[in-house]
Image (cartoon, rainbow, N blue to C red):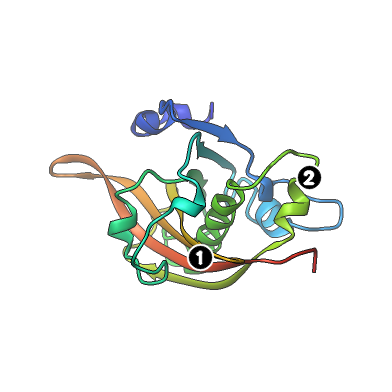
Amino acid sequence: MEYFSQFPTLAPILDLTNYETVPVWARIQKPGGEDGFFANTLGNESTIPHCVMLRLKAPTPLSERYQGTSGSARNAGEVALQPPDTIMILELSRPGVCSHPSTAHGGVVSTILDEAMSHTLLSHFPTEPATVDNTRMTLFTSKLEVAFKRPVCVPGVLIVKGWCVETNGRKYWMKALAVQHEQTGDGVKEVIKSEGSGIWIKVDSKM
């Protein structure tokens, strides 16, 4: 939080009183090697040196979520009318995440969206440090779709807003929007860079 407080454009997000800071569990390297990609490969000074996540303090229970349109068909604009369950803020550095000059690789953007939606879903389960890994190991991405709208600028700050839009049994439908602040003729605005959606499955025990 302290690092991102230097960016004036992030103040409206960091000052939200209905959100709380929670751990980004995938940034913690595990003894067995789990999470090495997001914690180490994408967790150094040349890739993503800083990352923080905010969680909505009182989200709508999953059982009371959107009715009518199925989660897979619901568009990002409709979802964005609701407060996001989580907001992940990441500093993107170069050259480690670049493909084209000063542009984040699409695979990195996809990974970020996948992790953001995974952590969004996890936020609806008990996340005590002693047991959180047991829960995480039961949640798996079954389907992931990414729409690249505009290039993600590097170096820069990327904001990812995540929603769990529907649940049915062991299936969970997720949505995410990745945005960056850009200077426009009307001032600084959030510009959507990519959209993510997918289905997560919860299994009964560790696979």
Badge count = 2
Residue drawn at point x = 59 percent, y = 66 percent? 169
Q: Residue at x 46, y 27 (%)?
A: 5
Where's residue 108, x and y in %? Answer: 53, 63
Q: Is residue 61 left or right of residue 72?
A: right
Earlier sequence position, callout 1 versus callout 2: 1
Residue 98 appears in the figure: no
Q: Which residue is mark 1?
A: 110
Of 145 and 58, the residue lying toward us: 58
Asked which quadrant contains residue 127, the reply is: top right
- Residue drawn at 41 percent across, 25 percent down: 15
Q: Amino acid at mark 1?
A: Ser
Query: Where's residue 3, x and y in %?
Result: 53, 30
Q: Which residue is mark 2?
A: 131
Q: Amino acid at mark 2?
A: Thr
In x, y percent, where is residue 63? Answer: 50, 53
Q: Secondary structure at mark 2?
A: loop
Tell me the crowding category of disc 2: few under 14, some 14 to 19, or many 20 or more residues within 10 angstroms, Cα based.
few
Q: Secondary structure at mark 1?
A: helix
Measure how far apart labels 1 and 2 are at the Cα level: 27 Å
Residue 39 in the image: above or below residue 3? below
Estimate the x, y position of residue 22 in percent, counting from the top left: 60, 36
